[in-house]
Amino acid sequence: MFNSKNKIMKKMKLSVIILLCSLNFLFAQEPNKKFKEYKVWASKIDNSKVIKGILLEANDASLRIIGKKKTEIMVKDIYKIKIRRKGKVGKGAAIGAATGVATGLVIGFSSGDDPDKTVDGFFPYLGSYTYTVEGTTAGEKAASWAVGLGIAGTVVGALVGSKKEVFLINGDISKYQMYFDEIQTYSMNRKK
């Protein structure tokens, strides 16, 4: 019994160490970019189309967006601006998955092994019978919990990461000026 608990604890420690090392490798790399890129969705007042791309520049009268082509949209034509950091959904999903897997491993290993159960039964005309049902091991529980919570964590992380900053302009230059400093911080060519 004591030897079994030591094995379980060693497995749990090893799993946590491997997970932490992989997280460190995943998030410790620094990109070579000077500025972070932000995706932008600019809706026009006339509902003609949504301009999508990377926010290159925000100035007093317009937004410049790089998508399939470089586009400039005047403030008087903008209904709504949505902005989200590029890669935020994937990073949120990765963090959620790692958190779910780690939590699942801890829950599974900490619950320990289930004992074997002996089941007695009776069939009419055939008589009684006895069989043994093996209990679930801590490793099996850990794997089950890790998969389930890993999937749930991935979904939750992706949803949290998909949140966008929304600025309702409605063609009003004064509303745009109210949000201008914040919008400009998302621009690649921001003023220093």
Image (cartoon, grey):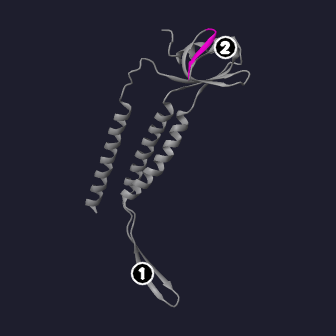
Relative to residue 51, is residue 16 drawn left or right? left
Asked if 153 appears above or below 65 in the picture, the reply is below
Q: Could you classify mark 1 by the number of other residues whose Cα lies within 10 Å: few (under 14), some (14-19), or many (20 or more)?
A: few
Relative to residue 4, is residue 188 drawn left or right? right
Outermost residue, left side = 3
Residue beneath the point at 32% across and 43% down: 18
66 within the magenta span: yes
Label 1 – label 2 distance at C-alpha: 79 Å
Asked if 155 appears above or below 5 in the picture, the reply is above
**Total numbered circles:** 2
Q: Quadrant of the N terminus?
A: bottom left
Q: Position of residue 143 (x, y in %)?
A: 40, 54
Q: Determine which residue is flagged by label 2.
A: 75
Relative to residue 41, is residue 126 drawn left or right? left
Q: Secondary structure at mark 1?
A: strand
Identity, as a three-letter code, of the amino acid under mark 1:
Thr
Dot placed on the residue nearer the N-terminal end, 1 or 2 = 2
Q: Position of residue 10 (x, y in %)?
A: 28, 51
Image: magenta residue range: 60-67
Helix, strand or loop for the magenta stretch, by majority: strand
Q: Which mark is residue 130?
A: 1
Residue beneath the point at 47% across and 81% down: 121
Residue beneath the point at 52% across and 38% down: 158
Quarter of the image for residue 138 reads bottom left
Asked if 118 appears above or below 161 in the picture, the reply is below
Q: Position of residue 156 (x, y in %)?
A: 53, 41
Quarter of the image for residue 68 reads top right
Residue beneath the point at 37% across and 54% down: 109
Q: Which mark is residue 154?
A: none
